[in-house]
Every structure is written in structure tokens, then in C-alpha cells.
Amino acid sequence: MAYVISDSCVACGTCAGECPVGAISEGDIYSIDANQCTECGSCAAVCPSEAISLG
């Protein structure tokens, strides 16, 4: 089960820099490619708005 980013995302970009496989895409709300996500949790650990969780 991949991590997902909720609507509370503030698009700060912190998570994208932490993803070791580049699964996070920029946008008004960032998104995580479920096929690339390795479920490491690095993105969720650094998200200042706590918008990332296991989907």
C-alpha cells in the first residue's frame, strides 16, 4: 500500500526532496505514484502539514 498525499498538502516541496525513488510529482497538491512508492515513509516523516499517510 503506497503513501498518499491528502488535500491538506500545502505544496511546500519538502517531501519531494526526501523521496529516494522520485515517486512524488509537483502540483497544486503534490501526488505520489503508487507504482514507484516503496513505502519507506521518508516523505511522511518530513511533511510539515502531516498530509502524507499510508493509503
Image (cartoon, grey):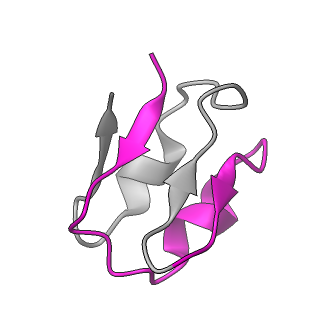
Q: Which residue is pictured at 55% across the width and 30% down the height?
A: 40
Is 22 covered by the magenta stretch?
A: yes
**Residue 16 in the image: above or below residue 11:** above
Residue sitting at the far front: 28
Decide if residue 3 is on the left or right side of residue 54. Answer: right
Q: Count how many numbered circles sit on residues in the image.
A: 0
Q: Position of residue 47 (x, y in %)?
A: 36, 64
Residue range corresponding to the magenta coloring = 1-27
Quadrant in which residue 29 is drawn: bottom left
Q: Which residue is pictured at 41% across the width and 61% down the height?
A: 46
Quadrant in which residue 38 is drawn: top right
Residue sitting at the far top: 1
* Quadrant, the N terminus: top left
Q: Which residue is pictured at 50% across the width and 66% down the height?
A: 30
Q: Position of residue 17 (x, y in %)?
A: 67, 67
Residue sitting at the far right: 21
**Residue 3 in the image: above or below residue 43:** above
In terms of secondary structure, what is the magenta stretch mainly? Answer: loop
Q: Position of residue 51 (x, y in %)?
A: 26, 58
* Quadrant, the C terminus: top left
Is 8 covered by the magenta stretch?
A: yes
Quadrant in which residue 10 is drawn: bottom left
Q: Which residue is pictured at 27% across the width and 55% down the height?
A: 6
